[in-house]
Amino acid sequence: MKEPIIKFEDFTFQYDAQAEPTLKHINLEIYPGEKILIAGPSGCGKSTLTHCMNGLIPFAYSGESTGTLTIRGKETKHQSIFEISRTIGTVLQDLDGQFIGLTVAEDIAFALENACVGQGDMIREVREVARKVGIADHLDHSPDALSGGQKQRVSMAGVMVNQVQILLFDEPLANLDPATGKRAIEIIDQIQAETKATVIIVEHRLEDVLWRDVDRIVLMREGEIVADLAPDELLSTDLLLENGIREPLYLTALKYAGLTITPACRPRSIRSLTLSEEEKGRVRDWYHCRKEKEKKTGGRALLQAEGIDFTYENGFHALKGIDVQVNEGELLAIVGTNGAGKSTFSKVICGFERQQKGILKFQGTDMKDYSIKERADRIGYVMQNPNQMISKTMIFDEVAFGLRQRKVPEETIEKKVEEVLKICGLYPFRKWPVSALSFGQKKRVTIASILVLDPQMIILDEPTAGQDYRHYTEIMEFLYELHNRGITVVMITHDMHLMLEYAKRAIVFSGGEVIADDTSANILTNPAIIEQANLKETSLYDLALLCGISDPNVFVQHFIDYEEEERRG
């Protein structure tokens, strides 16, 4: 019988700065060659668990532990972080924070240089591992010049070159467009098949991870393991929703149609899902009994872009004749591949960049003479990377900063800041330093700092990246309420679930051009647009085809409408 490569026995860990343990009585065995998905809401202890595995605890984060943690049969407290790193390679969520070399080749070779590997062997090993992850054609490129998916491959190569036995991925899908995320999961699967390494994935986007099989899902809550089950078994329970994790959309649709999910129907993936003819008929019956909701006509134009053209100083033609209208009180999604022009377009709107051609109008007035401040009074912008927005040490002060700059009375500031912090799930941390927060929590701080200013229009670049389902829902429901009160909300996102659930209309960018402007349901059931813009078809589309429904786009729209009724009544 195989011995576990990682084994926790009644393991408890408490940070020095915390009053209570973060991990409580963990018992977990991971065997060589397994692929494990670790899921759970923010603050459940996932990151602490992985830090214990890769040696960051206790070598970077101090605290007290009881019980035992062994890797390859040896307790971690008897190993150095260098020894652990020879067994476990970690790919971080913040890819830019993991790069060291000036070129891809240098970055991959870093561990080999530290191990004093000869130059000839080093070149061969770098080329071989680069081939495995599909980045061999970019060895002379700077890591900063790569796309998100390419950066992730470089990070994978940088840990694989050590010939580690365990690969640990911390939210590998964060900030990747849907198609790139899908390919990332495929690459992880291919790497495991080729290297026979043990793979541990920590990720919120459960349905996307399950595009390829995993052996087990470890579900955590409040520092404890609440489930350790095969995917088919876990997805046949309500444990995911009870613990703040979104279940796959196709399973939600089946439940709406009155079906009971069991392991026998193989629910782990839409590709493996098995339904009887009677069950397919019940899905069709649910679809046919739904009536199409009356579509609301668009409101008055708030923002109009006419022929916007923009080229960066390095010659990159980022925007090519963009014609877009955003209506008052609309909730709109902007989607497309990495580097398609989405973020550049938002920077032009906010005045961070100035277009070379075209006109931007806000409420019918040309904004060419508006300063960045004058635009900011009307349009709030929440950046994708929270570290680029934060300027204060304390959370309360960061959210209050804009109000204080506007000379708002302190008693008003306190009331408004506390209200927004509650909505964004940050009220318990209001007296904390920002540095103590996770990446996802910092994201919520930056959203709060803009929402507190009551802008007419708010642009959010990946508003829910790194958020668990509960905080995702809280933020999106708040944005939905802003939209209902007449504030225009524009979301740049890779999250197709977000697009389906909240955005009635979506604009699709590809190659610096707008290639589609339609309902979210129509876009995510259009194979040509999906392929061109690096999107990913919704599993609802596949479910409709599986059940013999001739109009999958209408089925998807019916699901969206029903979901909204269930959520809001």
Image (tube, rainbow, N blue to C red):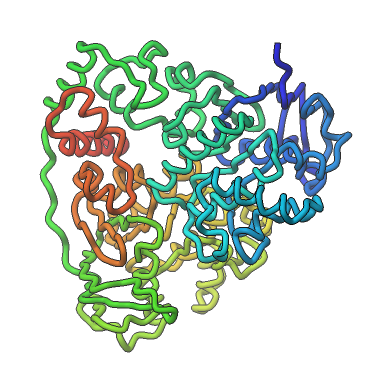
Instruction: Tell me: 254 left or right of 189.
Output: left
Asked if 231 appears above or below 294 in the picture, the reply is above
Residue 195 in percent (x, y) is at: 61, 33
Q: Which of the 4 image quadrants contains residue 163?
A: top right
Check the picture and name the quadrant holding the N terminus: top right
For image coordinates 32% across by 28% down, the residue present is 250
Instruction: Tell me: 102 left or right of 320.
Output: right
For image coordinates 41% across by 30% down, the residue present is 247
Residue 434 in view, yes or no: no
Q: Nearer the viewer, residue 490 or 328?
A: 490
Number of dots carrying numbers: 0
Q: Nearer the viewer, residue 162 or 269?
A: 162
Residue 406 in percent (x, y) is at: 49, 78
Residue 333 in percent (x, y) is at: 30, 55
Instruction: List the single residue furthest toward the bottom.
Output: 369
Asked if 225 appears above or below 371 in the picture, the reply is above
Residue 129 in percent (x, y) is at: 60, 46
Instruction: List the single residue furthest toward the front.
Output: 120
Asked if 173 appears above or below 246 in the picture, the reply is below
Check the picture and name the quadrant holding the C terminus: top left
Residue 352 in view, yes or no: yes
For image coordinates 77% across by 29% down, the residue present is 71
Q: Nearer the viewer, residue 83 or 433?
A: 83
Asked if 308 appears above or below 231 in the picture, the reply is below
Q: Nearer the viewer, residue 263 or 467?
A: 263
For image coordinates 48% across by 52% down, the residue present is 149
